[in-house]
Image (cartoon, rainbow, N blue to C red):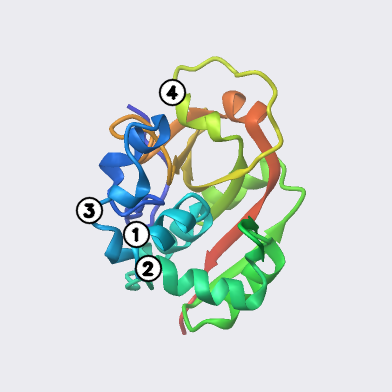
Amino acid sequence: MVTPRRSRPQVPYYAQWESPELVGDLLTGRTRAENDPYWARSGAKDPTEYAFWSWKTCGVACLRMALASMEINPPTVMSLVEDLVDVGAYRLDGVRVHGLVYAPFVEYVNAQDWSLTATVAAPLEIGDLRLHLEGDGLALISVHPTIRDLTPQSEPPPLQREGGHLVLAIASTDQHIVFHNPSGWPGRSQVEVAVQWTSLEPCFARRGILLTKEETP
């Protein structure tokens, strides 16, 4: 059992999809996002819109988790998506989506009345990430999607630093980083996933967004 150092309350979990228990079937193709019975909770106008965006909203899920940890009722996924498209954090090119683009995302977060400060960290070294987490900060970190297959005992995987997926780092120990993965395997790698720092290193893209709760007077 990995016991992280932290003083903040537990961070609630949100998947990229409205039904976290379906993530495994979605990743393996046994079902389609359009079939998620709770798609309407996302705020999408129909299952097609929900399915299109659900594969692209790991960063939105991370933001919603961070807000919930501050006892803020997070906006729906599509409400955030629409805002982030407007500010250029998601850029549509036909049927392709570019993003999450860090700079406009950070500007958007900092402009809201959430008492949350976001900072682009690129490069982000592991030592700096550890210090941020030990100070009770949170961080969206860019990792290879195969991070979902790692366990606390995993040996370091092959070098895969291109990123492409965001998880929410929530805590640390001397040996492990602890994070929520919006597209982790149900029951295995979704909630409070502990991975050795040495195993994170090969699949960590050395960039992310640091989140800090603002102190209230």
Q: Name the kind of residue labelled 2 in the image.
A: Ala
Residue of label 3: 37
Query: Which quadrant of the structure image shows residue 181?
Result: top left
Task: Between residue 87 and residue 123, name the one nearer to us.
Answer: 87
- Give the Cα distance between marks 3 and 2: 13 Å
Task: Between residue 132 and residue 82, name the one nearer to us.
Answer: 82
Q: Name the kind of residue labelled 1 in the image.
A: Pro
Check whether the beta carbons of the residues at disc 1 and disc 2 lie within 8 A of each other.
yes
* Numbered disc in front, either 4 or 3: 3
Q: Where is residue 94 in the image (x, y as percent from the top left)?
A: 65, 61
Nearest to N terminus: mark 3 or mark 2: 3
Nearest to N terminus: mark 2 or mark 4: 2
Q: Is mark 1 on a helix, strand or loop?
A: helix
Nearest to N terminus: mark 4 or mark 3: 3
User: Which disc, if any, is residue 44?
Assistant: 2
* Numbered disc in front, either 1 or 3: 1
The local crowd at label 1, few if under 14, some if 14 to 19, many if 20 or more residues have their Cα within 10 Å, is some
User: Which disc, if any, is residue 167?
Assistant: none
Seen from this angle, which residue lies furthest right? 123
Q: Can residue 214 be seen in this view?
A: no
- Give the Cα distance between marks 4 and 3: 30 Å
User: Which disc, if any, is residue 47?
Assistant: 1
Q: In this view, does 188 lie above or below 163?
A: above
* Numbered disc in front, either 2 or 4: 2
